[in-house]
Image (cartoon, rainbow, N blue to C red):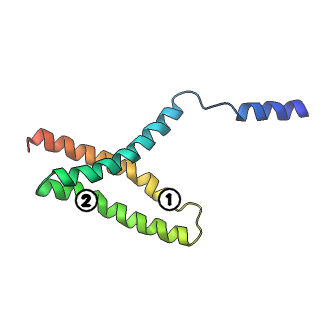
Amino acid sequence: MSSALAAVGAGAAEPATGPLWLLGLAYAGMAIGYVALQLLLPWRWRGGWRSAAQLPMAGTGLLIAWSAYAYAQDSNLWPLLLILYLPVGFVYLCATALVKRLAGA
């Protein structure tokens, strides 16, 4: 019986291998990249492009308020929606930057 428990314990201590850890690293990078782009792009762009860059800020603000409410209610999943939203905002800001560049503006 102890050898079976040792085998389970040994398997649980091994680090993740394969492409799954790269997916998690990319996801975390997109969340950090969103914050950087959200601060940079509205500051650098003018006119309608600035409005387009500020659009994800509305969703982020609502999710921060919801996360604060969930945290106050002792929810253990309070940051979940915010964590899931940030990479989507990153992709949106990257696509907006690409369209701006292709439009030559």
Q: Quadrant of the C terminus?
A: top left
Task: Say which residue label 1 marks.
Answer: 79
- Identified by mark 2, the residue type is Leu
Where residue 58 appears, x then y in whole percent?
Answer: 30, 64
Tell me the element at label 2.
helix
- Residue 103 lies, with reference to residue 84, above or below; the image says above
Where residue 77 appears, x then y in whole percent?
Answer: 56, 60
Residue at the farthest top position: 18
Task: Say which residue label 2 marks.
Answer: 55
Where residue 46 appears, x then y in whole percent?
Answer: 12, 55
Which badge, 1 or 2, comes first in the chain's sequence?
A: 2
Q: In which quarter of the image is the N terminus?
A: top right
- Residue 10 lies, with reference to residue 99, above or below; the image says above
Q: What residue is rendered at 47% in x and 37% in y?
A: 25
Drawn side of residue 66 relative to residue 40, left or right: right
Drawn side of residue 17 relative to residue 90, left or right: right
State how many labels appear: 2
Q: How far apart are marks 1 and 2 (CA)?
A: 21 Å
Q: What residue is rendered at 54% in x and 72% in y?
A: 72
- Residue 69 lies, with reference to residue 88, above or below; the image says below
CB within 8 Å, label 1 to label 2: no
From the viewer's side, name the closer residue of 33 and 3. 33
- Identified by mark 1, the residue type is Pro
Q: What residue is rendered at 52% in x and 62% in y?
A: 78
Where residue 71 appears, x then y in whole percent?
Answer: 54, 67
Tell me the element at label 1.
loop
Residue at the farthest left position: 104
Give the numbered dot on residue 37.
none
Which quarter of the picture shows residue 52? bottom left
Which quarter of the picture shows residue 63? bottom left
